[in-house]
Amino acid sequence: MAACKLAEATITDVHRAFRSGGLTAKRLAGMCLERIEAYDRKGPRLNALITVNPNALKAAAALDRKFRKSGPAGPLHGIPVLLKDNVNTKDMPTTGGSKSLEGYIPPADAFIAKRLRDAGAILLAKANLHEFAVWGETVSSILGQTLNPYDLTRTPGGSSGGTGAGLAADFGILGIGTDTVNSIRSPASACSVVGIRPTVGLVSRAGIIPYSLTQDAAGPMARTVADAVRMLNVIAGYDPGDPATAWSIGRTERDYTRHLKKDGLRGKRIGVLRSFFGSQPIHGDVNALAEKAIRDCRKMGAAMVDLDTPDLDSGRIVSDISVHLHDLRPDLDAYLGDPKAGTPVQSLGEIVASGKYHPGIEKNIKEAMALKRDAGYFERLAKRAKLQDRIMALMAEHALDALIFPHQKRPVVPVGESQVERNGSLGSVTGFPSIVVPGGFTRPTETAAIGVPVGIEFLGRPWTEG
């Protein structure tokens, strides 16, 4: 960064360049904006960002003045962040990707947006998402389809695909995603970045457009584990605006970076969740990369334990246990109906009546309109509790520190198709923490010069992010 190189820059690179005088926050923000201008609406037209902060350079200049006078404003001083556009910002619209909320500016920042500003970050842009986060291809009525930077014929995963694609394209250094079923980890896998879905209650969801408060989580996305962890330090913690965070008291750590150890796998026991692997030819590339990851873990000192778990099936976890569609209407209605919010629509019913949404979400939102929190809903919650117990017992029986599996059994789908065979439901339905890290690339194709990214997921017990 001394030579102002943006590609793949980390927080450490940026702060070193700030201290040396080779870079300023304003210059860094300008470099990101130049790259956005060249690649988001022009060139490959990634279509990753809904709104670019018109005051980004002004905010960066203020940070530069602060730096010259008294040093950095906080641990993320001058770092450009891409926020998924379901996170409230007081100075930019928050749309959820929907024309029904076009132009809506919330009265206050979400808790995590304020935390990021207080840490010195620059909220550079609001990223596209699958509308209201309800599926996984990152297509919305307000912006359309986001493309995968590694293969422009494919989706970037989702629903936080604008954040994932933007980070892969070096539009920012850090990003925020949200995750109800797969939505942080899917684009992390598809775009070769890191995504952390924290334990429900570690990071506040206050001021974020909800999908299912039973399962919703917000978390960091970045190009390296170290950067994602530094971001987690800033956004984790108790918030009276989200009662779930009360469960984090006494269970969080002041500094998760102490766990960033090169030999951190030595002596660990990792369970290989074989039921989350595919068995058909279409799964070959992903399986090969997952097996390499397993061998790498073993080389780094971990004991790898094959698990025989035919009862654990990621697809059935979604169809039989997940409550995301049951929660969508009541939880979204509570957000939209808040009299202090001043949203242009006050309920999911009004969104449906307006017709201002992408036709691709119609089936899901109309199904959500018809669902109730009835006996079937509470039966799912009972199954959820049994699944939590099953995973805890599995880890206890085999003395495991974590589970490992490919996030997606096959590569991310081409544009126009629906995501299939993703494995993120285990983390989201249990509420347990998980992280997706880059696992490599499939064989090159005509449209993917170095192949399509594949992510490897690690899942742990609650509150074991460290």
Image (cartoon, grey):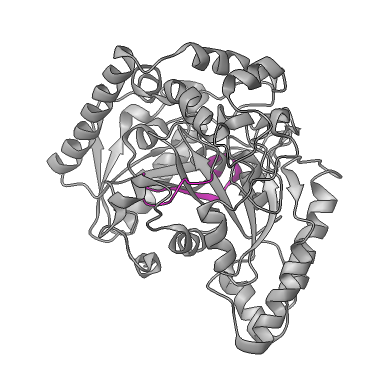
Residue 371: where, in percent of width, then height? Answer: 44, 13
Q: 244 and 2: which one is in front?
A: 244
Q: Is residue 396 magenta?
A: no
Residue 327: where, in percent of width, then height? Answer: 43, 25
Q: 444 and 22: which one is in front?
A: 22
Q: 33 and 170: which one is in front?
A: 33
Q: Identify which residue is drawn at 27% across, 57% down.
A: 251
Residue 423 image-quadrant placement: top left
Q: Is residue 192 magenta?
A: yes
Task: Give the magenta-colored segment's residue range.
Answer: 188-207
Q: Quadrant of the N terminus?
A: bottom right
Residue at the farthest front position = 339
Residue at the farthest bottom position = 69
Left or right of 438 on screen, residue 261: left
| Magenta stretch, overall SS | loop
Residue 180 lies, with reference to residue 280, above or below; the image says below
Q: Identify which residue is drawn at 85% across, 44% down.
A: 43
Q: Identify which residue is drawn at 57% across, 32% down.
A: 336
Residue 424 lies, with reference to residue 298, above or below; the image says above
Q: Visible in this render: residue 348?
A: yes
Left or right of 371 on screen, residue 365: right
Q: Quadrant of the C terminus?
A: bottom left
Q: Identify which residue is drawn at 63% across, 30% down.
A: 131
Residue 333: where, in percent of width, then height? Answer: 52, 28
Residue 71 lies, with reference to residue 465, above or below; the image says below
